[in-house]
Image (spheres, rainbow, N blue to C red):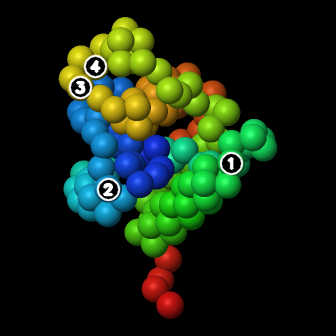
Amino acid sequence: MILIGIDTGVKTGYAHSIDGIFQEITTETILSAQDKIHKIHEEAKLSDIVLVVCIEDTRKRQWVDPRIGKERLKGIGSVNRDCSIWQEFCERYGIRHLLIPPSHIETKLKARVFEDRTSWTARTSEHSRDAGMIIHKYHRLFEKGVVDVPAAIEPKKNK
């Protein structure tokens, strides 16, 4: 199984694992991350390998501190828009995906803590570590049967 974790935003956190072993953890633009996923999706289809994209969905955030200010709220709005773009991307190409609430993910880990938890020793950014933690957790949940792997979906036709 291939899992890809996405931490949405201008600096998109991207993590990719195969059978729970990290292959790549980087920070990308939204378009470069989508290009990578599209290529992996096409290759996975040829091999009948299950690919699931796990996207942190800030639209499912239950609470925002009212003291954060107008500029930060604008930033939250753009990240919410990015979540919509990711959802549309996955639906357009028929890519299995999960939209994961931020409260279900352990985020904002320091590099040393991330390395201790995952054994990934290469350099990472906060965004890429967040993406890595998504798939680190969900790989275990899928293996234990706590969370079902999303069903295959048909690509949506362009209107």
Find disc 3 in the rendering and name its residue: 123
Question: Dividing the picture into quarters, in which one does residue 111 lie?
Answer: top left
Is residue 130 something one can see in this rendering? Answer: yes
Give the CA distance from mark 1 to mark 3: 32 Å
The residue depicted at 51 percent of the width and 60 percent of the height is 82
Q: Are marks 1 and 3 in contact (CB under 8 Å)?
A: no
Along the polypeptide, which appears first: circle 1 or circle 2? Answer: 2
Along the polypeptide, which appears first: circle 4 or circle 2? Answer: 2
Give the CA distance from mark 3 to mark 2: 17 Å
Residue 144 in the image: above or below residue 149:
above
Q: Is mark 4 on a helix, strand or loop?
A: loop
Crowd tier of the residue under label 2, counting other residues whose Cα lies within 10 Å: few below 14, some 14–19, many 20 or above: some
Q: Are marks 4 and 1 in contact (CB under 8 Å)?
A: no
Q: Which mark is residue 29?
A: 2
Along the polypeptide, which appears first: circle 3 or circle 2? Answer: 2
Q: Is mark 3 on a helix, strand or loop?
A: loop
The residue depicted at 28 percent of the width and 19 percent of the height is 120
Crowd tier of the residue under label 1, counting other residues whose Cα lies within 10 Å: few below 14, some 14–19, many 20 or above: few
Residue 123 in the image: above or below residue 64:
above
Along the polypeptide, which appears first: circle 4 or circle 1? Answer: 1
Identify which amino acid the numbered label 4 is placed on. Answer: Trp
Horizontal side, residue 22 vs residue 80: left or right: left
Crowd tier of the residue under label 4, counting other residues whose Cα lies within 10 Å: few below 14, some 14–19, many 20 or above: some
